[in-house]
Image (cartoon, rainbow, N blue to C red):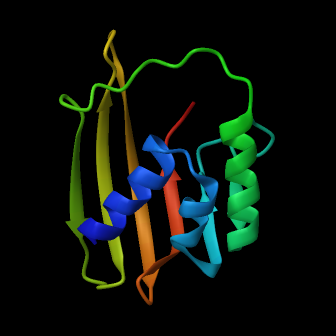
């Protein structure tokens, strides 16, 4: 649980590497952001490793307004095991260096050591 989560954070938030991120998912894996509008800039739902790779590559490549830098020392997360050994929950509080932050919850469903379904609850 901890190792997979750390690899996911590194591949996505820190290195923004769509290939490394997609490799963490099963071939039929799903990356879903239920609170994000379906027609918005962040992918609402991506099904399959290839769609995850392409969708996240497009997200990472988009021209965007400057985003606040993450203050790693003040950011926190807690991983919660569930009654289902293939499901864990990440509760994340991200702090920014200038001010403010962002809180989110992620629900991971794992199969054979890879992410089969990730629900990422956040708003832009």
Q: Specify whether residue 48 is in view.
A: yes
Q: Nearer the viewer, residue 44 or 113?
A: 113
* Position of residue 57 measured from the top left corner of the image (x, y, whole percent): 71, 48
The answer to which of 33 and 13 lies nearer the viewer is 13
Question: Please, is residue 115 above or below residue 61 in the view?
Answer: below
Count the numbered circles shown: 0
Residue 112 falls in which quadrant of the image? bottom left
Q: Nearer the viewer, residue 76 or 103?
A: 76
Query: Where, quadrant-wise, is the C terminus in this rendering?
Result: top right
Q: Residue at x 25, y 82 (%)?
A: 83
Which residue extends farthest top? 98
Give the residue drawn at x 33%, y 9%: 98
Which quadrant of the rendered structure holds the N terminus? bottom left
At horizontal 31% and vertical 56% (from top left) the residue drawn is: 90
Residue closest to the far right: 39
The image quadrant of residue 100 is top left
The relative height of residue 64 versus residue 93 in the rendered view (above or below) is: above
- In the rendered structure, the answer to whether residue 46 lies left or right of residue 90 reads right
Q: Is residue 111 left or right of residue 53?
A: left
Where residue 88 sits: x, y (%)?
Answer: 32, 70
The x and y percentages for residue 13 are: 46, 43
Camera-side residue: 119 or 62?
62
Which residue does the image show at 49% across and 41% down from the upper left?
122
- Above or below: residue 76 compared with residue 88: above
Dividing the picture into quarters, in which one does residue 8 lie?
bottom left
Q: Does the rendering let one see residue 37? A: no
């Amino acid at each position: 649980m901890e190792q997979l989560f750390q690899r996911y954070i590194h591949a996505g938030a820190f290195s923004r590497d769509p290939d490394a991120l997609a490799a963490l998912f099963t071939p039929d894996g799903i990356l879903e952001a239920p609170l994000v509008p379906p027609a918005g800039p962040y992918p609402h739902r991506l099904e399959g490793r290839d769609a995850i790779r392409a969708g996240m590559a497009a997200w990472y490549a988009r021209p965007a307004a400057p985003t606040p830098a993450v203050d790693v020392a003040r950011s926190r997360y807690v991983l919660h095991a569930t009654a289902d050994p293939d499901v864990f929950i990440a509760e994340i509080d991200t702090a920014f260096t200038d001010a403010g932050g962002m809180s989110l919850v992620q629900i991971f469903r794992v199969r054979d050591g890879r992410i089969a379904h990730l629900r990422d609850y956040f708003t832009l």
